[in-house]
Image: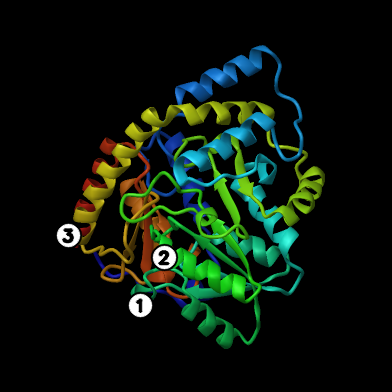
Amino acid sequence: MPLITLSKRSAVEPFHAMDILAEANRRRQAGRPVISMAVGQPSHPAPKAALEAAETALKHGRIGYTDALGLRELREAISAQYRLRHQVIIDPARIAVTTGSSAAFNLAFLALFDAGDAVAIARPGYPAYRNILKALGLNVVEVPVTAETGYTLTPASLERAETKAGCKLKGVLLASPANPTGTVTGRDALKRLATYCDSRDIAFISDEIYHGLTFVGDETSAVEVTDKAIIINSFSKYYCMTGWRVGWMVLPEELIRPVECLAQSMYISAPELSQLAAAAAFSAQAELDIYKESYRTNRDFLMSRLPELGLPLASPMDGAFYAYVDTSRYSNDSMEFAKRMLAEIDVAATPGLDFDPLEGHRAMRFSYAGSVSDIAEAVGRIAAWLKQD
C-alpha cells in the first residue's frame, strides 16, 4: 500500500480514538462486518457466578445505595484475594469500592494533590491519566519509557524528567501490566520505584487493573513492597465486567476518610447490584482462566504474525491484551492509517497518538481481547490490505 504522510494540519490538531470507535459502531449498525481491535473490552461475558448473583439481587430488589466505601462483604472478599494471591493481609477498612477504576483515579488525584502539582506518568501510556490530571489543573510530566528503561518508569528516568520539567514531583503513576505497552514491572523494579518515591515524599499510585492477565514476568502488587502506595484495580479486565462499573482502591490509613468524603459527594456509591456480582466473581477463577488462555492464543499469534506483516512490536507483550506496533513502514500518521483500515477492510484499531502525543503518530495499538476467530480474520484482512499497491 502507498505511504501515508503526516500533514501539517493533522500534526497540530488533536484526534481522538473515539472517532474510530464511533465510526466502527456506525458501520456495524449499517451491516458492515466490522472487527474491533480498538478497545480493551473482553469478548467473554461476565462469569456465571456474577450473573447469578446479579439475578438474585434483582429478585430481592438489591439495587440501592451502599456505604460510600462499598459493601462490607465485597471489601472483605477483596481483602481475602490479597491474602490468597499476594500473601499480604489488608484490613478491609483500607479498601474503597469505586465506580470503576475511572472514579478511583479521580478520587486519588483529588485526595493527594493540589492544583499545579506535578505528577509523572509513562509515555506511551493510558490517555485518561493525562486528561484527568490536566482537567484537575495538575502538571503532567510525561516520562518516556523505552528499551533503555525496560519500558517502565525507573528512579533514574524520573530524576531526568524532573530536571527537564524544572519542578518537584508530587506523584508518580505506574501501570503494570501497562496499557498500551503490555509491560510487566517485576518485583525488584517495583520495589526500587516505591522506595524512591517514599524517600522523596512522592505519592505512588499503582494501577493494577490488568492483574490476572500476565503472561511473562512477575506479577507483583505494590502492596507487597510498600504499605504507602495507593492501589487501583477493577473488575473490568480479568473479570470481564467492563459495563458493570465497579473497581477498588487500597488506601494508606490516612487517606481512608478523605477518599470516603470525596466519594460521598461525587459518586454516593458504586452500584449495589454490581458490587454483589463482583463479590461472586472471585469464585470463578477456573472459568476466567479459560478465557485468559484464549488471550494467550491471540497474543502468541500476533507476536509472530504482526512483525511478518511489517508491523514490528514497539514494546513487549508481557501482559494485558494489547500489541503496540510500529507503523512507520506504512504510515507516519496513525490516525489516518486507522481511518483507512476501518474504511477499506472494516478493522478498527487505536491510533498511537492517544497514548503518545510525541511519537504516537507512527504507532498503533491492537487489542487481542476478542475471540480467536475474530483476531485471525482481522489479521488476514490486514495482511491482504498491506500487500495492495
Q: Position of residue 211 (x, y in %)?
A: 45, 47
Query: To which quarter of the image does residue 305 belong?
Result: bottom left
Task: Out of 3 and 283, give the one closest to the viewer.
Answer: 283
Residue lying at 75% horizontally and 31% vertically, measured from the top left: 66
Which residue is tagged 1?
148
Which mark sits nearer the N-terminus, 1 or 2?
1
Which mark sits nearer the N-terminus, 1 or 3?
1
Which residue is tagged 3?
308
Going by the numbered disc 1, the residue's amino acid type is: Glu
Going by the numbered disc 3, the residue's amino acid type is: Glu
Picture quarter with the C terminus:
bottom left
Graded by Cα atoms within 10 Å as few (under 14), some (14 to 19) or many (20 or more), the crowding at tag 3 reads few
Q: Is residue 64 left or right of residue 6?
A: right
Going by the numbered disc 2, the residue's amino acid type is: Asp
- In space, the residues marked 1 and 2 are separated at their CA atoms by 17 Å
Which mark sits nearer the N-terminus, 3 or 2?
2
- In space, the residues marked 3 and 2 are separated at their CA atoms by 34 Å
